[in-house]
Amino acid sequence: MPSPSTVRRSALAAGALALALGTTALTALPGTAQPTPAPVAARIAAPDFAEVAERVGPSVVRVLSAERARPPRAEGQPELRGTPFGEMLRRDRDPGEAPRRAGQGSGFVIDPAGFIVTNAHVVGDAAEVRVVLTDGRDLQARVVGSDRATDIALLKVEAGAPLPALAFGDSDRARVGEWVMAMGNPFGLGGTVTAGIVSARGRQIGAGPYDDFIQTDAPINPGNSGGPLFNAAGEVVGVNTAIFSPSGGNIGIGFAVPARMAQQVVAQLRDHGNVRRGWLGVSLQPLDRDLAQALRLADAKGVLVAGVEPGSPAARAGIEAGDVVTAVDGRGVESPRDLAAGIAERAPGSGVTLAVLRGGSAVERRVELGTHPASQAAAKPSAPVAQPSIGLRLAPRDGGGVAIVQVEPGSVAAARGLMAGDTVLRAGEREARAPRDVVEAVTAARAAGHASIALQVERDGARRFVAVPLQAG
């Protein structure tokens, strides 16, 4: 075994060799021409967010909610179960799932009068919502309105004096690679600032028909939901909403609702307490090259109408299955999401002009938009109801299907993610035209010894099947 002095000498020799090699590599031999160095691109320094954070910090708040008694349920949105995002995309949830559950998230002031934006899933069906300001004040909050489809909620607090408010920026001008800063309440730690870039725009993550998320690698963790995503000027360009993660913690893939969409929703929540979206009454699918050729179209631009609901605004305007919609009021549409968003932006009762290709010929159809039947049913809680013993209270619905007007806490229906406002279109093999159809289908399935029944459910224009277990009794 070498002595310590030998080890030291060997280390010194190795260090001298490394230095000699480094020196040789960096020094030109005498008499040789030195190569011209390659041009080096100017390095762009990251912005200093200190001034922005100091300026906007007082407007970012902590949101605390205490929910009514409800059973434990899996994290994430029920409509994502069975999809690649089902296990990975997680909404912020409190670690404990107690019968009376306390949740926490973030929010930000948008009006000195005390209006605060947060996520709908932060508020949930809370019996109590409180807001903690940066100065330590703990204020009772009133839920002005909440929109599940975009996951935006609006709160109101009485602070006794004007609060510092933030301004929305133009999220349509946000560029991929642009620096952004997130601020919020991760893991209940209080005001925390993180920074990153815009990783992508227009992300669809299967959360609903109006998916249009900004993706960012600014670290977002549980508790950040509802907090603002800022640009370098300190303008709010997004509302932090979800993360993609196998563990529930940050791995650099977060999603924010664009400010443009949030502003539109907030304005309606403030004026009406809910969001009133135009309704066309069609089912859509993307138009690919094979379909375009089969329909004798020159190219695959536009959206294919897969079906038209009887009696809907589209049906009254003469829209037919097989039509290809290429524009709404002159604005081109390239995907079903483009058309759904374009219609949803307009108020019920307003008119739109659809550019349509039918049989290779271009035509225009003027449509007077309606109100989605599910929204109408939810607004009529006094309608006759029926209960099929799986925790649902159902009511008739104009235009087809059966409206879910209440889901009992602790029921199997609640555990499977069914919500008031959903519409049941089919129960087992039976089309649901009236509440009794669902009741009879559940009764027959239970009598036949089936372990579950498949319900076809529509929510915000999106249809899916839900397997509901059948309990004895």
Image (tube, rainbow, N blue to C red):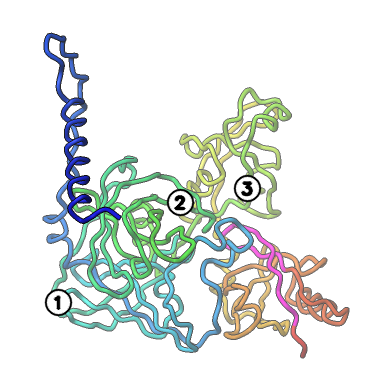
Q: Residue at x 57, y 73 (%)?
A: 419
Q: Kindly identify the residue that appears in the image at 57 percent across and 85 percent down.
A: 409
Q: Amino acid at mark 1?
A: Asp
| Residue receiving disc 2 | 346
| Magenta residue check for 457 | yes
Pointer 3 and pointer 1: residues touching (CB < 8 Å)? no
Q: Looking at the picture, which amino acid does disc 2 mark?
A: Arg
Neighbour class for label 2 at 10 Å: few (<14), some, many (≥20)? some
Image quadrant occupied by the N terminus: bottom left
Q: Which residue is mark 3?
A: 314
Residue 135: assigned label: 1
Frontmost residue, 178 versus 20: 20
**Magenta part of the chain:** 455-470
In front: 281, or 242?
242
Asked if the residues shown at circle 1 and circle 2 are in contact, with their CB atoms under 8 angstroms apart, the answer is no
Which one is nearer the viewer's eye here, 93 or 118? 93
In this view, the mark in front (3 or 1): 1
Residue beneath the point at 53% across and 49% down: 340
Number of marks in the rendered image? 3
Q: Along the horizontal axis of the image, is 246 left or right of 19?
A: right
What secondary structure is marked by label 2? loop
